[in-house]
Image: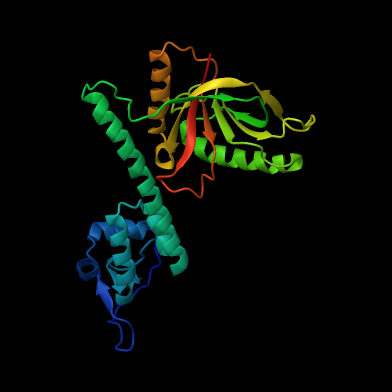
Amino acid sequence: MANVDRVAYTTEPTASSERLLTIGEFARRSRLSTKALRLYERRRMLVPAAVDESNGYRRYRESQLATARLIATLRRIDMPLTQVAEVVAAPEPRAGELVAAYWAAIERRIAGQRELASHLQIRLSGAEGSYDMFEIQQRDVAEQLVLTEQRHIRAGELPTWMGAAFGRLETSAERFGGVAGPALAIFHGEVNEDSDGPVEVCVPIDPGLEPGKDVAARTEPAHREAFVRIKKAMVEYPQILTAYDAVERWVTANGIAIAGSPREVYFTDFMAAGPDDEVCDIAFPIA
């Protein structure tokens, strides 16, 4: 039996105490099934006010209906139980922030999936120019001195590590006058569920400086690159792979040789941007 707070009782609650509801009545009034209530009890999200030790009958306080209805509402927006538990346990201001963060993540995912679905619809219809939705451009990039951090990592861990690594490098860059250009994430190998790169994150600093041996730094060579600019919604994995595919196909179709590892170039404040804001270039160095 679940590990819950057990209160044995043999008499009905007094008139002065809060009314206790049977699990059946509580289920009807909360619009939750008894099966769901037992699940939430096991997860300590909604524990009965009393459990009869002799027969296991559960009773709930009427005031618990608000929590039950909150859980039911959160489940209707497909919030996972682990996050539902966090919302239920949080005080009201924090609970609202958690719901807002959850829904913002849903909107980012849907925006990215919408872009991906649009691309797939064009591609799978057999129409020519299935990558015409991407505007491929070219540019020359000057030599850069960059602070760098590299790691073998898989797709699921990549966003967290990249954010932390960029933060560390930006802090280090303050010793050398600050960041001198867009941050880079260079993919020296495939990154997915089965392959782990490696990935190198770079933050440019003043090229006239000499960082010293206590920091990892190198020179990123001057080069020409083909690139496409994407919105924040497209940065999510796996939809970002469509942009990589578009640039690579454009390069191949134009008879151009790829001359270096592909990279993501972050030219604006990623965290402050909305799903429809342009935040990143997917670029391939070319010969």
Q: Residue at x 40, y 41 (%)?
A: 233
Q: Residue at x 45, y 25 (%)?
A: 194
Q: Whole-percent x and y of residue 115?
A: 33, 37
Left or right, residue 191 beside residue 198: left
Q: Compared with residue 80, is residue 89 higher up or lower down, i.e. above or below?
A: below
Question: Which residue is more in the foreground, 101 or 19?
Answer: 101
Q: Quadrant of the N terminus?
A: bottom left
Q: Compared with residue 269, is residue 4 higher up or lower down, i.e. above or below?
A: below
Q: Whole-percent x and y of residue 165?
A: 61, 38
Left or right, residue 151 beside residue 11: right
- Residue 3 seen from this side: no
Q: Residue at x 38, y 57 (%)?
A: 84
Most extreme residue toward the bottom is 16
Question: Which residue is more in the foreground, 35 or 137?
Answer: 137
- Residue 251: image quadrant is top left
- Residue 171 seen from this side: yes
Question: Which residue is more in the foreground, 124 or 82?
Answer: 124
Q: How many numbered callouts?
A: 0
Q: Compared with residue 195, is residue 66 higher up or lower down, i.e. above or below?
A: below
Left or right, residue 281 beside residue 20: right
Q: Whole-percent x and y of residue 13?
A: 30, 82
Q: Compared with residue 77, is residue 248 higher up or lower down, i.e. above or below?
A: above
- Residue 143: image quadrant is top right
Q: How is the image coloured?
A: rainbow
Q: Whole-percent x and y of residue 103?
A: 37, 53
